[in-house]
């Protein structure tokens, strides 16, 4: 089971995150615009679960509900044994936007600041920040400001900041979608490395089949809005784009998405 701060025991029989018949709508009175309809899936500690679906299908809405930014209108989201989800450092979020950093703070301060807010002293928060900047290959940029960084470095900073919170899960919303293909490929490799080292649990939103296969252990395939689970596909160990399993899995995902993801075109 989970202890007081939500860390699981050695051999948990319970998923870290469980979504049961989750329904979320927008609209001030009657929630007439359903964005998520009857979504159920589970995420186990240490897993990388990809939420794959076409643009506008409700992926960000789902992630925001897990983060506690919005409440579901129906169903249950249970995280680390709790159902009253308010935003908290146990669920760190990395967004797509390159402007999620504080522009007036250095890379070091961007990563250390949330720790200071949580009551850490300057030295210990900078020490922790330095550790995660090293992990994300940013030591040389520690005293740069966001406007001096490339898109890839900005996203690395956001990842370092999220990791520094020592969360139970990293929630990532298309964090590499705006990067050029070369940078994106490099960050895929780096993220896989980091997850391997930290045993971090990741819930990652994407529109890209390729990304889902390279990063994921399991892929929750969502249909057109309102989001509904079409299938959950096991893709653990599928990382080499030239392997037969990769090609087969891509075919399987493409079939599931049919024409829902820009005619099957991967990002
Ligand atoms: P995705 O991340 O898959 O692109 P979203 O979760 O952002 O999709 O959006 C799902 C649906 O909900 C879309 O139709 C979108 O227009 C609508 N939506 C998202 N956010 C809001 C909001 N704050 N108010 C009203 N409608 C919204
Ligand atoms: Mg989105």
Image: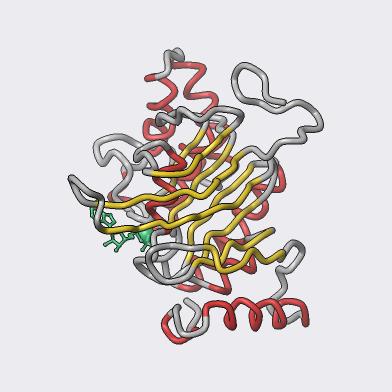
Instruction: Identify the residue shown where x is 77% and y is 35%.
Output: 13
The residue lying at 50 percent from left, 46 percent from top is 171
Residue found 43% across the figure and 39% down from its top = 67
Q: Outermost residue, right direction?
A: 11
Relative height, residue 231 to residue 14 (above, below): below
Residue 35 vs 145, above or below: the answer is below
Q: Position of residue 103 (x, y in %)?
A: 26, 41
Q: Residue at x 45, y 87 (%)?
A: 263
Can you say which quadrant of the picture contains the N terminus?
Answer: top right
Tell me how the rendering is colored. Answer: secondary structure
Left or right placement of residue 171 versus residue 81 in this view: left
Residue 197 percent coordinates (x, y): 71, 43
Could you tell me if residue 154 is visible in this image?
A: no
Q: Residue furthest left?
A: 28
For ligand 2, which image quadrant applies?
A: bottom left
Q: Position of residue 5 (x, y in %)?
A: 59, 20
């Amino acid at each position: 089971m989970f202890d007081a701060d939500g860390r699981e025991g050695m051999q948990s029989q319970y998923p870290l995150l469980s979504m049961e018949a989750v329904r979320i709508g927008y609209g001030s009175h009657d929630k007439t615009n359903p964005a998520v309809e009857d979504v159920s899936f589970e995420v186990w500690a240490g897993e990388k679960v990809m939420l794959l679906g076409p643009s506008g299908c409700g992926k960000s809405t789902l992630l925001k509900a897990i983060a506690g930014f919005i409440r579901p209108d129906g169903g249950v989201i249970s995280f680390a044994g709790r159902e009253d989800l308010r935003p908290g450092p146990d669920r760190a979020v990395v967004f797509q936007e390159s402007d999620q950093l504080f522009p007036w703070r250095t890379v070091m301060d961007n990563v250390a600041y949330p720790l200071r807010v949580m009551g850490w002293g300057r030295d210990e928060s900078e020490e922790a920040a330095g550790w995660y900047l090293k992990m994300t290959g940013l030591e040389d940029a520690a005293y740069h400001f966001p406007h001096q960084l490339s898109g890839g470095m900005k996203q690395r900073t956001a990842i370092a900041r999220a990791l520094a919170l020592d969360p139970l899960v990293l929630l990532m919303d298309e964090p590499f979608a705006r990067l050029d293909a070369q940078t994106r490929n490099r960050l895929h490799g780096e993220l896989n490395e980091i997850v391997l080292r930290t045993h971090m649990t990741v819930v990652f939103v994407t529109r890209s089949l390729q990304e889902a296969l390279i990063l994921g252990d399991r892929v929750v395939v969502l249909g057109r809005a309102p989001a509904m689970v079409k299938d959950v596909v096991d893709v653990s160990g599928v990382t080499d784009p030239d392997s037969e399993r990769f090609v087969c899995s891509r075919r399987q995902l493409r079939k599931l998405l049919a024409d829902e993801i820009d005619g099957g075109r991967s990002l």
